[in-house]
Image: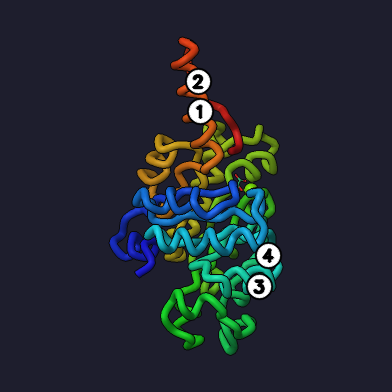
Amino acid sequence: MNPLREAWAQSRAAFGLWSVVPGSFGVEVLARTGADYVCVDQQHGVIGYDAMVPMLQAIEAGGAAPITRVLSGDPYEIMKSLDAGARGVIVPLVNSAADAERSVAACRYPPRGTRSYGPTRASGVIGSSDPEVLDAEALCLVMVETREALERVEEIAATPGLDGIYIGPTDLALSLGLSPTLEIREDEHVRAIERVREACARNGIAAGIHSPSGEWARRHADAGFDMVTVATDASLLRGAALAELAVVRGERAETEEGKGYS
Ligand code: 3PY
Ligand code: MG
């Protein structure tokens, strides 16, 4: 069973980690922490397709669900990531129900969708080459992270076959004319995030969100989010390195408050 789906089957929020640093060992370490999922970020991570494949293998071996944020909504990128054994995709910058439908279609074989048949690694990972089983296993999440998407979030959330919406708080803040941050403090940012969560709840799909820390992740889970990314490998490395350097130098550790994106 995929631990991300298992969390949802148990009606609890799934907690995950995010990787922007290439290399299989780092994500294997993350996957062995008991995180429900580890996401390989092909959009903003410094990670290409060839680097991603062994990362998916290491995450699966480490016991977390390997998912990936694809570079774009290009259906061929979505299909290629699923063929490589990603248990799900997160598609950035989806601004309409038509965009969401196209992403869902890329995750499903005909007659349900447009995915081309060739589950090269996926059939081994999932243990079946049956198109219906592969369809049922592939999670499709789209990102709402612009004003345009927010205004149409009720239609996007109603897209048939969509498994969930994942919020990118930083892009959403920028698009709303606010400073780019993962910390949800401004009223307009707070209202926007709640509107997306409610649209997901009304349509019975997962509401996911990116967060900068365990503290923010806890708040999102308490607010009813079903999928919360707790931290990225780069921010964890930087935070731990700064903390230890501060100790050896007898300085106060730099606060991570307001660290913005990563
Ligand atoms: C955002 O905050 O915009 C994201 O895409 C998070 O990675
Ligand atoms: Mg974004």
Q: Which residue lies furthest to the top in this view?
A: 250
Circle 1 is placed at which residue position?
241
Amino acid type at image mark 4: Gly
Observer-side mark, 3 or 1, equals: 1
Amino acid type at image mark 1: Ala
- Give the Cα distance between marks 3 and 2: 48 Å
Where in the figure is residue 184, as x and y percent of width and height?
52, 36
Q: Is residue 221 left or right of residue 100?
A: left
For residue 102, which numbered disc appears in the image? 3
Q: Earlier in the sequence, mark 3 or mark 1?
A: 3
- Give the Cα distance between marks 4 and 3: 8 Å
Q: Which of 44 and 155 is in front in this view?
A: 44
C-beta proximity under 8 Å, tags 2 and 1: yes
C-beta proximity under 8 Å, tags 3 and 2: no
For residue 73, which numbered disc appears in the image? 4
Amino acid type at image mark 2: Leu
Q: Earlier in the sequence, mark 3 or mark 2?
A: 3
- The residue at the point 52 percent across, 67 percent down is 86
* SS at badge 4: loop
Q: Earlier in the sequence, mark 1 or mark 4?
A: 4
Where in the figure is residue 95, as x and y percent of width and height?
68, 59
The coloring applied to the image is rainbow
- Give the Cα distance between marks 3 and 1: 42 Å
Q: Nearer the viewer, residue 16 or 128?
A: 128
- Give the Cα distance between marks 2 and 1: 6 Å
- Give the Cα distance between marks 1 and 4: 35 Å
Classify 10 Å Cα crowding around label 4: few (below 14), some (14-19), many (20 and above). Answer: many
Where in the figure is residue 113, as x and y percent of width and height?
60, 82
Q: Is residue 177 left or right of residue 135?
A: right
For residue 245, which numbered disc appears in the image? 2
